[in-house]
Image (cartoon, rainbow, N blue to C red):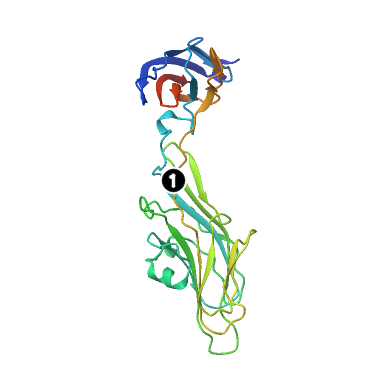
Amino acid sequence: MNKTHTWRLIIGLIGLTLIYSCKDKNVEAPEFNVDTDKAEYKVGEAVNFKISGDPDVISFYSGEKGKEYQFKDRTTANGKVSLSMTTQVLFGRQPNNLALLYSTDFNGLYDAANVRAATWTDITSRFKLSTVVPGGSGVQTPSGVVDISDLPVAGKPIYFAFKYTGDAVTGTTPTQNTWRVYAFDLTNTLPDGSVLNVSSASTAGWLAIDFVNTANKWTIQTAAPFIFFNPNSTLVASEDWALTKALFPNNVDPDVAAPIKTYLQTVNDYKYTYTTPGTYTVTFVGTNGKNTGSSSVVKQLTIVVK
C-alpha cells in the first residue's frame, strides 16, 4: 500500500487502574490487565487486545464518539442548539400573520387558559418566512439554520408555538392567509461535532389550541405539510396556536459499553478495528460481583491513529 494512503496506529498504554465501586468488603477487586499485540496498526487491521486475569464481567469502550467511558454517566450536554424550518404562505392578503414563539415556563396543560398564563417570547424575526403577493401563492421557503442556544434554560423543557392571527374582514371577500409548515428541525451540535436530532416536524408532538373562532384550527398530519392552517374562507377574526411537546435540546443518552465477557465466559483477547484517524482512550472495565455488592477495576489505553 502506498505510504501516503496508509494510516498508522501508535498504541501507548496509560498506566491507569482505578477501583471505583466496592460495595462489599468481601467482594475482591478483580485482577486483570490489558495489553496489545504490537505497537503499530494499519487502518482496517484488527487491534488485538490481550486480556489477562478473569473478572466476572468485562465491558469495553472503544473511545469513539458515543462509546467513551468519560461520558458513561452523562445525561446532558451543552452544545450549539439550532432550529430550521420551511414554511409556505398561500392566498389571502394579511401580511405577517404567523409568529413563532417559545416558552420555558409553560406548564404543559394544553388549553387556552394555561397557554395564556405562560410567558411566550416572539422569535419570528430570527427566521426567514415565506412571503406572498396579495392573493398569490408563495413558495416553500427554508428559514436558514438559526442558532438558538440562548433560549433553553438548564433543567427546564422548552416549548415552541406557531401563532396564527387573522383579522376580521369588513366586506364579503376572505383575506386571511393559509400557512403550511414542511420542516421544523431542532438539533444540538456537541463540542466533538456530534449532531443530536432533538425533533423534527413529524416528531415535535404538535397540539392545536383554538383561541378565537372555532370554525378553523391548525391541522396536524403525518405527511408534509406536517402542520397547516386553512382559514376556511372565514370573515371573522381568528387566533389559533400549534404547540410542540416539551423538548429538551441539551439531553443526551449516556455512552454505552460493549459487553465482551460474562460470568460463564473465558476471554483471553478481544479484537477491534478502527477505521478513522484520531486519538482514542480505550477503556476496559472488569467487575466482580455478588448479590451483596460489586467491585470494579478500570484499565485504559491510548490509541493514536495517524
Q: Nearer the viewer, residue 22 or 260?
A: 22
Residue lying farthest to the right in this orientation: 223
Q: Secondary structure at mark 1?
A: loop
Q: Nearer the viewer, residue 48 or 176?
A: 48
Is 65 above or below relative to 237?
above
Q: Residue at x 47, y 25 (%)?
A: 278
Could you tell me if residue 283 is visible in this image?
A: no
> Quick one: label 1, few (<14), some, or many (20+) residues within 10 Å?
some
How many marks do you count on the picture? 1
Residue 37: x, y in percent? 51, 10
Q: In this image, 55 relative to 176: left or right?
A: left
Residue 202: x, y in percent? 58, 56
At label 1, the amino acid type is Asn
Q: Residue at x 48, y 48 (%)?
A: 187
Question: Would you identify the image quadrant in which residue 179 lies?
Answer: bottom right
Q: In which quadrant of the rendered image does the N terminus lie?
A: top right
Residue 106: x, y in percent? 40, 63
Is 116 above or below relative to 269?
below
Could you tell me if residue 113 is visible in this image?
A: yes
Is 189 above or below relative to 290?
below
Residue under numbered circle 1: 251
Residue 15: x, y in percent? 36, 15
Q: Nearer the viewer, residue 40 or 25?
A: 25
Question: Would you identify the image quadrant in which residue 302 lies?
Answer: top left
Q: In this image, 299 relative to 216: left or right?
A: left
Is 100 above or below relative to 191?
below
Q: Residue at x 47, y 64 (%)?
A: 161
